[in-house]
Image: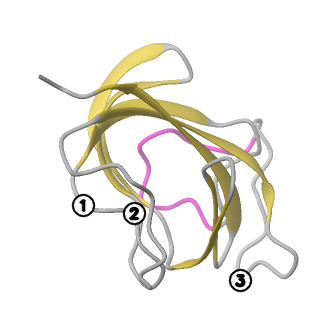
Amino acid sequence: MKHALPYPPGVIVQITKLSACKSPVSEPSSWEDWIPGSRNNSASLPVNYELRGALLEEVVVGGSIFVFRTSRNGVAADGFFKSTTIVGISKGSLVETFNSVYKIRLLSRGD
């Protein structure tokens, strides 16, 4: 059985970082230190980071969450979001990666 969310590429989702995982590879940043859009951030996204956009790939254990982002924390901000490797998916659309625990909510089918 494949461990994946039932959302195909193209659907519109909201993703919220709920917490760091139990043993993150990189600890979450503080909001004061996080620079949106920078490739030089040395830590993981801050907790309560939220984005909306279109899934570009299926959300499956062993893959990554990959989204074309249209908003970040309620502000329009086109760009790409890619998580670290997914290590678990549980009920309630909770996805755990090497760094973080995310809640993924379907907003629309993208039709």
- Whether residue 32 sits left or right of residue 97 in the image: it is right
Label 3 crowding class (10 Å Cα cut-off): few <14, some 14-19, many 20+? some
Q: Nearer the viewer, mark 1 or mark 3?
A: 1
**Residue 57: x %, y % from top left:** 24, 61
Q: Residue at x 65, y 62 (%)?
A: 44
Q: Position of residue 56 (x, y in %)?
A: 21, 53
Crowdedness near tag 2: few (<14), some (14–19) or many (≥20) residues, C-alpha within 10 Å: many
Q: Position of residue 110 (x, y in %)?
A: 19, 26
Nearer-the-camera pick, 108 or 99: 108
Question: Closer to the camera, 14 or 50?
Answer: 14
The magenta stretch is 33-42
- The residue positioned 31% from the left and 48% from the top of the image is 67
Give the color scheme: rainbow, by chain, secondary structure or one colour. secondary structure
Alpha carbon separation for disc pair 2 and 1: 6 Å
The reply to whether callout 2 and callout 3 are in contact (CB within 8 Å) is no
Find the residue positioned furthest to the front.
1
- Is label 1 in a helix, a strand or a loop? loop
- Provide the residue designation for mark 2: 59
Mark 2 and 1 residues: CB-CB less than 8 Å, in contact?
A: yes
Q: Is residue 78 left or right of residue 48?
A: left
Q: Is residue 63 above or below residue 11?
A: below
Which label lies toward us, 2 or 3? 2
| Residue that label 3 marks | 25
Residue drawn at 52 percent across, 14 percent down: 74
Residue that protrudes farthest toward the top in the picture? 75
Amino acid type at mark 2? Val
Q: Locate residue 52: give its quadrant.
A: top left
Q: Mark 1 to mark 3: distance in Å?
A: 23 Å
For label 2, the SS is loop
